[in-house]
Image (cartoon, coloured by chain):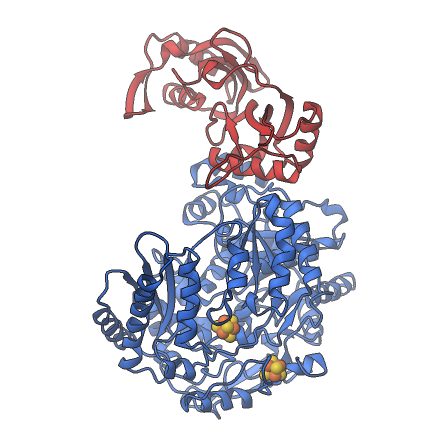
Chain colours: A blue, B red
Amino acid sequence: MLRKKVESVIMEVQKPARYMGGEVGSIVKNKENVDVRFAFCFPDIYDVGMSHLGMKILYSLINERENYWCERVFAPWTDFEEVMRREEIPLYGLESFDPIRDFDFIGFTLQYEMSYTNILNMLDLAGVPIFARDRGESLVPIVCAGGPCACNPEPLADFFDLFILGEGEEVNLELMDLYKEMKDKGASRSEFLRAAAQIEGIYVPSLYDIAYHEDGTIASVTPRDNAPTVVKKRVMTDMDKSYYPDNCVVPFTEIVHERVSVEVLRGCIRGCRFCQAGFLYRPFREKSTETICKQAKALCDNSGYDEMSLSSLSTSDHSDIVHMLDELLKYTADRRINMSLPSLRIDNFSEDVLERVTAVRKSGLTFAPEAGTQRLRDVINKNVTEDEVMRTCAIAFAGGYTNVKLYFMLGLPTETDEDIIGIADLAQKVVNLFYDTPNRAKGKVQVSISTATFVPKPFTPFEFEPQVDNEEILRRQNVLRNAITSNKIRASMHVSEVSRMEAVLARGDRRLCDVVYAAWKNGCKLDGWDEYFDGEKWLAAFEECGLTPQFYANRTRSYEEVMPWDHLDYLVSKKFLIRENQKAHQAQTTPSCREHCAGCGANSCLGGACF
Amino acid sequence: MYNRINYRAVFEKTGSAKYISHLDLNRCMQRAIRRADLPAWYTEGFHPHMYLMFSLALSLGAESMCETMDFRLTESIPPQEVMERLNAALPEGLKVHAVVFPKYAAADIGSAVYRVELESSDVQALAAEWDNFAAQPEILMEKKTKRGMKEINIAPMITVLSAEQTEGIFRIFLRLPAGNEANLNVSIVTDAFKKYAEQPFSIVKAIREKIFCLNGEEFS
Ligand code: SF4
Ligand code: SF4
């Protein structure tokens, strides 16, 4: 038995609890009574994956069905991978210790581009052929993926049998139902895939032929076997009726987020032009306070966690936020549960909200103005003014805060040195404000600036924009460094090939599958971990395949160009994206969805206006 | 002011629970107490936390039938009920055998008894080697002390209570010093024997069976 084999070697590795399962809330079924087995794979290590909300939802959702069994699978850390390869331990599900190569579905969640090589490595550890075309005609296993990066799955198209677009609560079960039906009938893999392609939200890449122009851009995408010309993402239209778990797996070992996640809303009303999530998850839909409180209480009671996070893209945009926090506090305060709002926005951060969040425990404040000048903030449609930043910091300082973290991006479209110096100026003004606050807390103020390199993403108005190359980013970092004069300001920035690889993979086409494969063959894995990312190996992979990263990352794309993801429909129209891109170049802002509908098209799923 | 009633849970840590580190055990128990909805007593001050005390650390990977955890409740609840509620909230491998009002303090602990089971193709040869091993006047092993790694003679610290062979298994009962004054992990003994023995073996089990006080009474 595999469990025994693992036990005999597991003490050789760090944190064995990552690999042993048995946690409170994990679901073990009798496989005799199970018809369809699903291996939910998170392509990063346990500590990261166990914090992920989508996995918690789908894990419980699938397991609610008596005859379906979903198990968790994570990438092993390098020490355990070595042991697995040495002892020939195949990748297994944490619940059953059965090899996942025998499961009906192997489903990955695509959360970030730099996890792609982990997927190949995990398939390899599982003993599953890496290329979909090598998996033969038997049904088992169907290798699929969903999550935000599935909006442009082309750089992974050759490795997957199908992709699930949009929100998975309904479509996952529909897919499994179809599978069970066809398995009972003895269908082949290709028969199943052809049928699956008829489900809304299912994209079967092998049913689409891609033709290229001589310059490397896409000429056409042609569906076969009745597959739809355009595959539309799935949306849960009523968040109060949408499935939400009342329990979760509680890990033994420490993970990234040690807390219950209560999802309060989906989508975002803002439309910041760099933000993929803001467009991908449209339209904005919120849960009622009543639903939120009910779900929060059940999760806390069942898990025993003493921290709860209200998660969403922008929790303070909930229309009933103050009342909701009051209602939640009634429950959390005397149970010593700490409430955290990871996505507070700088412009609607009110005193009321602050008071309620700090009622239990105080932590640092983080804000993301993203750009240093009003002009550039208008370009990116970050509807935040300097006054608002100052007002919010004033409230925070008066409320006892001494640490402020400010997030910015470098390399945004139209950025000039003036915008960069504006970052330092803004930070300095925050420092000055602290010392001007009469009832400030004792001690020093600390303003941290963190800058990330801008990565243009699909389904945003900036999908047409080139990424600024590394040399220029370095120069811009120096401009910023030289503009900072106070020792109360700490700036963390580093340049690496990572941002460029993200830009490449985010907007890449199907030809990149060979690059991803070559990179993995060259030894790339755990690319999301600084200590493992190796830009040289990636560049070598490009060379081997006769492609360049510049083509994907640093090239301006015309509005007419066929994007690798144009046959996927995330409800936001390309016309709208072009309109927003043009407005960006004129530094014109677009009001939030709550103020005024900008006509993106996402309301089509609701059968009426969003608000 | 809240009431403050001291309780002690005696529990086993076996199976996959043996991979829970000491630090993680604390967190795990806190959550179990919360799930059991027991009125735990929290420390006062700026960062209140649930009061929990484990009397004797157990090394990662080792099993035990006699771990103890001290905690406090703000209401008086019958120990039997506390035990049942905890057990309903605990994962497999962690099971409370008794909840008592503490009699001894952690400082009273003097020794612990372990059961070690070794598997080998030739148990008889292994048993003979063990006898020779245990009879040595000096067994030098590296041991972590407060002042870093130090080589010490562990031979006088080992008391062999019994040793027996059954179907491919060699079973030894050992008494080792435990507690504040002197402490010897069972893994150091098995490591020493591994270095000594020519007959290859694997460790099937190394389990702490009982904890005793310096006065010879069982710790409770
Ligand atoms: S507020 Fe802006 S950056 Fe934040 S999620 Fe919404 S669109 Fe994205
Ligand atoms: S349809 Fe209008 S209101 Fe709805 S998401 Fe699009 S822009 Fe916003």
Left or right: A570, with B61 as reference point? right
- Residue B139 position, x and y percent, is 33, 14
Q: Residue furthest front?
A: A438
What residue is at 67 percent from the left and 26 percent from the top?
A: B76
Q: Check the image and report above or below for A343 versus B166.
A: below
Above or below: residue A386 compared with residue A24: below
Residue A414 higher or lower than A6, as above or below = below
Residue A523 visible in image: no
* Above or below: residue A489 compared with residue A421: above
**Residue in the image at 45% along x and 78% along y:** A382
Observer-nearest of B73 and B25: B73
Query: What is the x, y in percent for residue A281?
Result: 58, 73
Tell whether A80 sits left or right of A202. Answer: left
Q: How many marks?
A: 0
- Location of residue A475 by image quarter: bottom left
Which one is nearer the viewer's eye here, A351 or A244?
A: A351
Q: Quadrant of the N terminus of chain B?
A: top right
Q: Position of residue B176 (x, y in %)?
A: 45, 14
Q: Is residue A554 visible to us here?
A: yes
Q: Residue at x 55, y 24 (%)?
A: B67
Residue A54 falls in which quadrant of the image? bottom right
**Where's the C terminus of chain B, which quadrant?**
top right
Residue A201: image quadrant is: bottom right
Front-most of residues A285 and A73 = A285
Q: Position of residue A19 (x, y in %)?
A: 52, 44
